[in-house]
Structures are given as structure tokens and as C-alpha cells.
Amino acid sequence: MDSQAEKKTVGSVLVVGGGIAGIQASLDLADSGFKVYLVESSPSIGGTMAQLDKTFPTNDCSMCILSPKVVECARHLNINLMTWSELEEVKGEAGNFHVRIRHKPRFVNEQKCTGCAECTRVCPIEVPNAFDENMSLRKAIYRPFPQAVPNIFAIDKRGTSPCKAACPAGTSAQGYVALIAQGRYAEALELSRKANPFTSVCGRVCYHPCETACSRQLLGEEPVSICLLKRFVADYAVEHGDVPVQPVPVTRKERVAIVGAGPCGLTAAHDLALLGYEVTVYEAQPKAGGMLRYGIPDYRLPPEVLDRDIQRIADLGVKILTNTPVKDLDALRERYDAVLLSVGAHYAPKMRIEGEDLSGVYSAIDFLRRINSGERPDVGKRVVVVGGGNTAIDAARCARRLGAEVTIVYRRSRAEMPAYAFEVEEAEAEGVTFNFLTNPVRILGEGGKVSGLELLRMKLGEPDASGRRQPLPIEGSNYLMEADTVILAIGQLPDVSFLPKDVQVTRRGTIGYDERTLATSRPGVFTGGDAATGPRSAVEAVGMGHRAAESIHRYLSGESVEFLPRIDPEQVVILERDEVAQRLARGEITLQPRARAAELPVEERLRGFAEVSLGLTEEQAVAEARRCLACGICSECYRCVEACKPGAIDHALKERYTELNVGAIILATGFDEFDARRKYELGYGRFKDVVTSIEFERILSASGPYEGHVRRPSDGKTPKRIAFLQCVGSRDQQCGNAYCSSVCCMYAIKEAVIAKEHVREIEPTIFFMDMRAFGKDFDKYYERARDEYGVRFVRSRVAKVDLLPDGRLDLVYVTEDERHVHEAFDLVVLSVGLEPSKGTKALLEKLGLRRGEGGFCYTDEFRPLATSKEGIYVCGAGSGPKDIPETVMQASGAAAEAGKLLASQRNTLTKKKEYPPEIDISGDPPRVGVFVCHCGINIAGTVDVEAVREYASTLPYVVYAGRNLFTCSGDTQESMKKIIAEHKINRVVVASCSPRTHEPLFQETIHEVGLNPYLFELANIRDQCSWVHMQLPAQATEKAKDLVRMAVSRAVNARPLHGTPLPVTHSALVIGGGIAGMAAALNMADQGYQTYLIEREAQLGGNALHIHSTLRNPHVQDFLNEMIARVQAHPKINVYLQANLKQLEGFVGNFRSTVEIASNGQDPTEVTLEHGVIIVATGAQERETTAYLRGQDPRVLTQRELEESLAKGTFAFPEGRRGSVVMIQCVESRTKEHPYCSRVCCSQALKNAITLKTRYPDCDVYIIYRDIRSYGLREKYYQQARDLGVIFVRYDLEPDEKGHGGLPIVTQRDGQLVVKVFDPLIQADLELEADILALSVGIAPRADAEHLATMLKVPLNAEKFFLEAHMKLRPVEFATEGIFLAGMAHGPKFIEESLAQAAAAVSRACTVLSKDELMAPGTIAHVDQLACVACGDCVAICPYKAPQLVTKEVTRRNFKLVSEINPALCKGCGLCVAACRSGCITLDGFDDVQIMAQIAALVSY
Amino acid sequence: MADETKKAYDPNFKYDVAAQPGGEQIKVCYSCGTCTAGCPVTEVDPRYSPRKIIRQVLLGQREAVLSNELLWYCETCYACSAYCPQNVKFGDVMRAIREMAVAEGYWTPQFLQRVRNVDKLAHDIRLDLIRAALATKDQTEPASIEPAAAIVSKKITEVLV
């Protein structure tokens, strides 16, 4: 890449994290002309806020206020949402970053998934639902919550389970085990058969490497009995009816011959038949089955079982020619397009010892073949079997069944035996004896018949190439053994005598082949099974059969014949012992030994060849299947694939990467909750009824595990006494989190209040240290909780929680007045703190960003949104714990920072939607098209959709009525467009789901074919019919018809509506020249917009002129001076000092203000400014007081005065004293008169105290306080102050019940200031001499706030601070569009918070200024001014100040006062329509004609 | 400041305690009360409160602390330290205060030694009783206390007399 391109600034932004912060930042940026990529690591956006029940202090439903933003974000043309994705790598620099995004495989095609949830019905895997904090279960295929956006499912797949990976045939063992656990035997059998046509066989004779790999063994238990489970479903089908085989028609012209009807050949035949080939199998023996039939004795595999599996293969259409040995391969090859040689290894090599030809000497294979063919040879009394493999064991056990005493001689020891241990054990149980380390040298005979053996003893030497120790003969140790029969089981080879020369044979005597393709040296001839590999197991032969079929298929299709690895070894899940132990500890799994199948008693076994194992009972099978640990999570049972109608599921999806070029990066990676298990003494994880606060949110939530019923987990009962424990994992140096988590006090109060709202009898108690209700309206909420709801507050930190015998929980604590208390509760909620999320930590590491306290992203106090790297910004809890409004402010602020950086590239990468010219429908009769949606079976499962469609087609004006499986799917949208054009439809009705989620989609669709979007109507027959009347399908169908009829009649009366375009003046007015105002002006001007800054004083700077240091930074004045200089020098900022807003006219995009400017000694001048937006940053002021001798004694200072004297060096203690400063907090704050917290005073006091103690280490500093509210990362300074020796004394407003305490009393005594205060901890009064008394006087709103608010038509709260549009999600704007808010005018706050809010206000303002014109929506109200009587009701009721009374010429020469509605301000809420007593206001889109038509349609039925 | 006043109120007391090994964190105490709540001695005698002692130290109540009998109630089991969210090692603080109390003449060194003996004895006795309990084969049966009681009684005499 050349350096020119590198330097180019790019107009796009990467936002990492899809919680509320990421969503807000994305929306702001996309709405102000930047392309946004929003990357979220989970499958959906919404973050923690989606999990919350309600939000404080307004008690709004969290999901309800979040949802519109989420939907808007997902639908935004310029936001590219990348869920289930992670930021992998960042290169480049500010303005031009190259980033790499990793998209994790969702296994669901995002374009095809419609969110119908059918897949979840069939998924057999249930896992703890993280969205419900693991208190409920969800399926492995899932979306995190029903309203999840995007509404696309994902499969929770950790990888391939070890059992599946171990199976040579590739059987989804975890899958069929999971299905069996649910009693779904037929599906389990089908799944097993898919990979293994010899399911009944392998359920008996498999050496089950799946079990060897089974993770269950990590629990110290035997593996899941996977093999027997397979047998169980096969046997179950025999007893309860099996699915008949459907013959497969031959669709391919090529013909395939398979030589040898063993497991390999027949599997290949099976696969090839399914692919449509004509397959003929040649078998030399009288029956098909190969070694399965002639090598495995009936007591292990009854012949009828084998017959069944083979019959199903034959039934596919495979021709099996038995007794048909192939002698001439050339001839065969000529008749077939491909040949598979799967002849097995039926030939026994000689041992080459003397006596091998005697009568009574058998090879094991011959012996077994005879037995399996029904012969019962006379073996005499004593049988010796030579060999240590499985065939030796089989031969020995058969010989036992013929009545002989059987000895196995083997030249090595037991440990080296190649036979499976379980078979050896069974042989021993049947009385077979073993002679190890012994080898025959000669077979002795008498009269041509065996009489015994001469053997030689062996010893073990060094390990050989196979790793087994080499047997070495012990010279001279020869001995004799009597025998009537000797069976030699020393190896098997294929019979290759019929092969022509050009088919190579290996030195070992097997057929040579290419490892990758199974092709032999002759083209078109393939090999597999024992013939290729030498003797192996059945399941390996099956696996090879699959490969052979695949290879032959590719060969015949002319494709490359190389295999891809069947399973990526990297994807195989390996569970750790620890993880399994934790799951056990959490109770997710329980210990349970492996099921044992019943077996035939030994004496009965020896009577014949009846099957030994009797298999598992159904009860056993289900219990056994439930032992599965579901290693892969998804079991790959593929039921979802079958269930998914749109065909969206693809288990083969792989992760992929996207490379992007972006100008800036915003981190919004959020927080993790503190793991309460780390506080062992509080019982979390040990006692079920100790829950975390976020779990309690889910308990409260209507969408939670208990559907909003307050229950405790242990027994589901409603708890009466609930304890909330604060600061769990916060303010705790022991667990490493010294900081305060900021939000817990308020959320605990909220949860207590909401719990009481759910169940009045609940008695909540909150155990806390300092109540940190520092935000706007928080203190009022706290007091209401205490005084109105009766929430009990106990100032104490609980030491420990124990379980009482009656199931309640015992809390031990000490009250402030030293009462030691044990108290029992039904439920304990731990208010867990916030930690930087794992994602945050990993990203900070990856991007090399500086980390601050607690591991959060470091930010500078004066650049609160910037990370240590230029062009990378941070917002929300990633930079420190904070609540939602702060997070939203920071998100908008970070967007503004990014926007500022990329301002030159605004609107360069964004797209604008283009629509075709609108079809003129005026004068056309209504032609209604009705689309009835099945919504998969969501609707169609209850409502008779065809009946609804049929009915709709009979309604007047309906020219088309159709049905769709998913009306919202992409292809259906396209077909809808065609239908609209084809039928000349001019009104569209969709009968489907909720307009909330889907109306904009359908409106968009019809807009795209030129229909006005207001000609659309939606009938919600899902929520209102199929869901709520699920049990009453007939009535639900009738109701659906009613709704459709109403919608049609309303649609018939719909008219096209058009928004009004409004031009935008691209400049801003900022009112107030303090830090917030200046920051806003600078940011705004840097965004490229002309900015007018008006300041009432003669000097810029505001309150900051009096602030010299902050807790973190001693250079406030430097910062301020630099800022003032930049403002004054900025070419795009016009500063007006001593200026006041006198008059404001206009509306968003088009304001016109008159500003009055005082000039010394002369008449004030006026200027008129035109601007598109206004930012109110008028600040607040220190409150004056006369309390505590303020104004009477010069030693009584405000904190600000104390700071100034310390900063200016005028501070000194009286001569000869060590110095004593007493500070009193909450003077004129948190009182009846001023019922709010001034937020900054605690930190101010700490700051001054720290300065004092640092400068005068000997002096005494006392801080008399009510709660120390050093929230967030400021807690560190509270700790520092204590460490320096500052003494904190708590007081309450009122004396306690004993009459102690109350406000401190300040007196002068002998010229000395004395502060008397009650110390609740020692229960005694303290008298503190003070050289200086510093009062934290709090922050008051500006006196002129009310005047300004009236002029701007914006509201104030009860305390006269400006009231934002929404406390949580719209913290920097007013309900009146185009007016924004920043700094202390909104409420008391710190400099860094003002800076963030100023940036946020700019960001929101840019969403207006970045546009050339604004579009007022079509649904607005109109006044019939002829009928209007100017009563003013509409003016009074409208929250948006849209109507105004104006004098107008209504008819010619007839002027009168009438209401006029400003379309730019109207939101179409309809309040004025309802309020109008003359009935002269109409709301377009909801006019009387439409509404009446709808009602008429309802009653006309 | 007069000497008497200084004893009653000594703003340097907290620094003196903090200067002792183990006392470093005492000033950081934010009086949450977890130490007292978790204290096994407070369970049996609620007058004894680690938090209150810390508070008195911080408020400079030198004499009140050093002369207080409750000083000797601590078992130095360190439960308080285990619970403390601010890492105040109250067990260590207690030892430091005791030594200061002896050094400043509120208590004799012999008394300090005697308390140490009691502590050791208490542990001894506990072990004896546990052993006695273990010696009883059937754990549902009451333990035979006689042999243990004899040992205990002998040990008490040795230490206190």
C-alpha cells in the first residue's frame, strides 16, 4: 500500500461492543454521515441492558426503552451489524485504520434465517441459559432472548465431540445419545444409520473407540455406554416397528461392482445406491456379511441381526449376488464403470511348524467359518488355541461351547494381547484358561491326529517397532501339553490369487492402494476393508466403505478424488477435568455409574450359541444417555437441519474474516459482573438462595426464569424477607477491586422497590456502607424507597451468610451502634460489582492501550473519551463503572470525538436510499393485496391460515390474497413486489406479526415499488391470535379473519401521506461559556459548523475559573486557559460576552435568536443569529448559606474558598497550632429544601483534605459526612485520605431514637471554633476544635434557568435543573427537537462528566446539522381553522409545543385567532386530536374515516 | 495540651499504632463492622468490638484503649483480618496495642505473659477435649470427660496459680 493511501482519512468508524453504548455511538455516527461497522461478540446486540428488568430512577422497563434503539440500529442503512464477531487485529493510525474482524461460525445462514424458532423445538440439547444467568435452560440452537436483534439463531457448538471424532464411521454419537435421552429413539436410529448402515451389528460387536474417548471418564466413572445405546435403538425398532426402506431410483448411468459383501463393501454399496448408482455386489460365500457372518460367532452377533442390516441395504436396490466368486477382474471391469475390491482377509497363513497338517489342527478363521455355517465339529476334550488376538478369543469361546476344556497359549504376556480386554474377561468368565509367555514349536500327533503340543517358554525383551516387548525363547524350557484339537489364530490375509498382475499387492499380502483415494494401481478399481488394511474391526470397515463410495463417486463424476479430512482435529473438544468438576459442583451434572446390560448366565451360555449380552432396558438406556456430558454442546444430530424450512442451517460453516478500512475506532466493550464465588463467606454457589443482583433482575423480569413471579431458587416459594448485600466485589481491597462500582446502590434500591411492587408482603433490607445515590433524582428515589415502600436500610457490612436448618439464611452483622446481630432471611441478593469485561481486557492488551485503575481502559480527566492511542475512543463501562445515562452520554461523546476526527469525510461513505417515483393512485379504485403469513408454524400451527386467506379474498376491493411461509423473508419480499406490480395493487395488508418490529420492513418493501408507504396496513394475527389463543384454534382463526377484515377496510380508506422537507441551517448556538459550553463550541466548530457562543459574564470560563485542581489533576487553570484561547482563536466560533438570549423563534434546523449584548456604559446592542441547533450549557453555581456561622466567622469557608486559598498560597494555620480543619458535608444538600445530592462535594472535600494532609502532615482533618459518595474510581481518594489520617465522622439529619446525633453544632468558645458532633460508632459526642471550618455547600441551579427554559420551551425538574427528554437514554437532549443540554445546567457534575456530556450534545446535534434537509413525518395533525375556536387546549396539552395560537386570515378579510400546528414539531401523537373540543384537528393516517371504517368492519360481522 | 488531656485525646495515637508492625493499614479502616460481625469473641461477649477499638484508636482515645480490659479478650484467631475488605490486620493491631499498653505501664509484663499462657493453655485444652472426644468410639455417645477434665484442671492450676 502506498503512503498516500495510508494517510487518507476514511469516513467510517468501527464500534466494538453492541451494548447500549455501542448502539448509541453507532446510531449517532450513522445519523451524522459516517459509515459504521458495529462488531459484537455475542449473537445479538443489546448488552446487559437487555437483561435488566427495570431501570432507575424512572422504573421504565429496560427492554421496552432499549428495543426501539436496537431495532433502529439493526435496520440502519449505514450501520453494518456484525454480530458473533470479534475484532482481531488493528493496524494503521488515526484517520485510517486497517482492522480485521473474525466472524465466528453461526452455523445458521444469516440471510436465510427468519427467526421462526422451529429449530429449537427439535434440538435435543439443553444448556444453561446465560441470558437468564443460567437459571433456566435453552437449546443448543438459540437466540439469546425472544426480542434479540438480529433475529437470527446461532448454534452453540464448541466443536466435534470426542466420541464422534473417534468413530471411524463418523457417527454423531453425542447426537443419538442426546436423542435417546429424550426418548426419541426412531430419530436416534435414523441418525446412527446415516453414518453406519450396520447399526444393529455395531451396537453389538463394535470395539467402540467412542467410549474410549468419552469425557465421562474425567469424573472417575466409566464412559457412557454408547455402543449399547446404539444397540438399544436398533432393537427397539425391531420390537416397535421400524421405518421401511424406500428404494432409491437409479439416476446415474454409471454402474459399480463391489467384490465382497462384507461391512466395507456393503457400506460402499449403500452410499453409492443412495447417490443413484446401480450397484452389484459379488459374494463368494453362500451368504452376505463377510467376516461379520463368518468370523464373529453367533453368541456375539446373532445372524438374524446381521440379516436385518443387510436386508435394509438390499432394499435400497443393491443387487447382492451370493455364491458368486469373482475370478476374472478384467471381465468384471469391462462391464462396470468402477470396481471396489472389498474381499476381506479370509485366508490363514501357515505357522510353518511341524505337525500343522495333522487332523484336528484348524486355522481359527476356518474353524469360525465352520461354526458360523452351522457345523459343530468334534473337537474332543482338550482344545488349545494359539494366539492372542480377538479371533483367538472367539475360537476359544466357541470351542468351550462345543464342550471342550480350552487353553489359550500366547507368546507374550497379558498386557501385550491385541484382543480387547472386555473380550478376554468374558472368555475367562466362561472358563477359558490362559498360558502366557509360551509358544508352540511342534504339534504332536498320533495316527495322523493331534495328540498334543510341544511348547517353549518365553521371556520379554526390549520393545520392538510396534512398541510391544519382544518375546524371546528361553532355551531348554520345552514342555508338552495334551490336546485333541489345536486352533491356530495367528493372522489373516486377503486371498489375492484372482488379481491380475497390474493390481499391485503389498509385501504384507494386502491389496495396494493410494491412502488418499483408496484407488488401486488399476484405474477405476478401488479397494477397502480388511483386503486393503489387513484384519481390522467392523466399524473401521464401515468407515472405509464410506470413503470408498465417496472416492468412486468423485471418480465417476470426474472430480478430484482427494479427501478433505473428515473432522478437523483442531475442532475436537477436549474437556478439562476442572471444568467438569465445576459443572458437577454447580449441580449441572450428577455422578451416576454406567449401566450394566444383563447377560446370559455362564452355564446357559455354554449350552449353545445364544447371544450373551441382553442389551439395555428402555429405562436403563434413557438414564445412561443422560450421563452424556454433551462435550460439543451441539450434538450434530442435524434435527435442526430437517426442521428448518428456509434451509438456513449449515453445520459446515467455518469462521471467516473481514478486512475493513476505518477512520476511527470506538470501544464499547462493557463490563463483567464480579464473580461472587470469590467471596466464599457470602455463600454464593454454595447456597441456592444466595443470588446475584443480575440473577435477581432475571427473577423479577416477566421474561425471566419465573416469568416475573418473585421466587427463590431452592423451592420456588415467594421469599418474604430479602436481604441485599452491597459492595460485593467493590470497595474491597481483599478481592482486588478497591473501586466503587457506582451503580449497585441504585440498582439494589430499584430491585427492592420492584420486588415490593410485585409482592407487597416482601420485606427488603439493604445492607450498605455508604448510600451512593449521587445522580439526578437518585436521592429522591432512595427516600421514596425508604419512606413510601418501607425498604429497610441497615448501615453495615454483612460478615457472613450461613444456611439454617430450616432452609433460611443466617446473616451476621453489627449495627452502627455496635449491636451484634444474627438475622434470618429467605433470600439473599448480592449486589455484585462491575469489572472490566474479558473482552475489554483482551482488547486493551491487543491494541496496546494503557490500562488504568481496576484494569479499566485509562482515560485522561480532560479527555475522558480518548484512549492512549489517537483515533481510538472509549465509552461506557470499559473505562470505569458507570450507569446507563453516563454510558449513553459517553457513547454519544465518543461518536462526536470520532466525528470530529473524520469531519472532512462526512457523508462520503454513507448511502442514501433511492426510491422509484411514486405511483399516482388518485382516482384509482382501491385494489387491496392481502398477504397472510404462516410464520413457520407460529401462526399456522394455531390459525387456519388458508381459511383466513380464503376469507380475505372475499372481502371488498381485495384483488389478491396469498399465503407465505415467512412473509418477512428476503425472497418473499421480492415476490411480494412482483405480485404488487402484476395485480396493480395499491393497498397492501399483511396479516402476520407485530407492527413494532415488522411494519417498517413492509412499508419499505412497498415504497421500493413506488407505492406510498402509508398505503400499508398490518394485522397482527400472531401476537393477538395464535399466541394468546393457542388453545382455541377455531376462535383464533375467526379473530384473525376479523382483524384482517378491519385492516382491509382501514387500508381501503388510506391515503398517501408525505413528509414535509425542512431545510437546515448548518450552524449552532451554544448558551454558556463555561467548560461544557466551550467544549461543545470547540467540538462543534471542529466538526465544521459555524458556532455562536454566548456567555453572560464578561469572561469565559464559568465555575472552572475557581477550580485549581481536581483529585487527579493539579493543572485545571492551564487546561482552562488553553481552552479559552482555542475558543477565541477558532475561525468558526463567534463569541459574544455579556450576552443573553432575548428571544427565540423557529424550530429544529431553523432557529433564529435575538441576543442582547451589554456594553459597558452604553445601551446594549442586539444581534440576530440563525442556527439549526441550540446547546444549553448555562451551568450552575455554588449555593450560599448562613448555616454554621457562615458569614459571621471569617474562619468558616466554603470548600471552594478553602481550595482557592490553598492554591493561591494564602492559607495558613494560626501560629503555634498543629492545625485543625473540620469539614461539614451536605450543607444545603440532601435536605428537605434541596432534596438532591450535589455529587461533587465529597470529592471536593477529599481533594482539599488530601492537599491539607500532604502539605501539613501533622494537622487534624475531620470530615463530617452523611455518606461518602466517592463513586467509581474516585474511591481511591477516599482511601488515600483515610490513609493520610483524615478522620471521618458520620451524622444524620435527625437525632436517632435515643436522641443522639443530628446536625453538628458549631459554636465559638474562647475565640475558638468548636464543632460538636455525635460519633455513632463510639456512641458519644466529639468536640472538635477547628482552625478552619469548611462547608460543602453544594450546587444550586442558575437563578435565570426558569426564564431561559420558558424562552426555549423546555422543562426544568423540581429543583430547577433542566430536564432532559429521557433520564436514561436521552440524557443530552430535550423532547423539543434541536435543543440539547450539557454540563451542570443538567445537574451537578465533575469536569470530565461535563466534557463528555458536551461532546454528547454535539454528537446529537450533528445528527441534525449533517443533513441538508429534515423530513417531518407524514402522520401529523392539521387544524381545520374555520372550525377552530382558539380555546388553546391543544397548545396546553402538546408536549412538543407544536400548536400555537396565531391570528390568520381564515376566510377573505376574516382574521381570527386560530390554532396552527407546526409540522416540524408535531410528532403525530394525537393528544391534540383527542383534546380538541371543536373536533377540528385531524391526524393524517389516523383520520376519522379510517378509524370509523375499521370499527364498522368490526361490528358489521 | 496538658498531659492528662493528651492521654484522653491524642491525635498521634493512630500514627503510633500504624508505626507498629502489622498496624500499617489501621487508618484505612472505613468502619464497615465486618470484623466485629465475624468475631467469635463478640459472639460470646458483645461488649468486645474490634471496630470500636479501631475507632477509638483513630479518634485518639489513647488511655481509654490502652487501659481497657477488653484488650485481653482477643483470641488472635484472625477472623477479623480474614473478613476485612481493607486489609486491616486487626489481629496484629491488637498485639501491637497490647505491647504499647504494657510499655506505657497500663499493664505489667507479667500480665501479658499470663495472657500468653492462657492463650496457649486454651489451645492445649481444646486439643485435649478434642482428643477425648475422638477417643470415644461411638460418636453418638457422650464423651468421657473425666480423664480430660483431670488434665485440664491440672494445666489450669499450673498456669494461673
Image: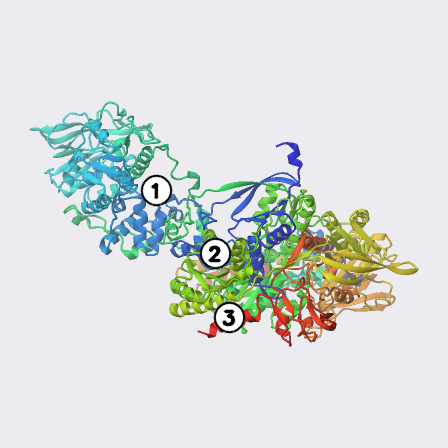
Chain for disc number 2? A
Question: Where is mark 3, residue-wise?
Answer: A1494
The amino acid at mark 1 is Gly
Residue at x-position 25% and y-position 35%: A256
Question: Where is mark 2, residue-wise?
Answer: A980
Using a 10 Å C-alpha cutoff, classify the residue at mark 3 as few (fewer than 14 neighbours), some (14 to 19) or many (20 or more): many
Mark 1 or mark 2, which is nearer the start of the sequence? 1
Q: Residue furthest right?
A: A1161
Q: Secondary structure at mark 3?
A: helix
Chain for disc number 1? A
The amino acid at mark 2 is Ile
Please tell me which residue lies in front, A1345 or A1003.
Answer: A1003
Separation of residues labelled 2 and 1 (CA atoms): 49 Å
The disc label shown at residue A170, or none: 1
Mark 3 or mark 2, which is nearer the start of the sequence? 2
- Left or right, residue A1053 beside residue A339: right
Instruction: Kindly indicate whether the residues beneath marks 1 and 3 are on one polypeptide chain.
Output: yes
Please tell me which residue lies in front, A405 or A1400.
Answer: A1400
Chain for disc number 3? A
The amino acid at mark 3 is Gln
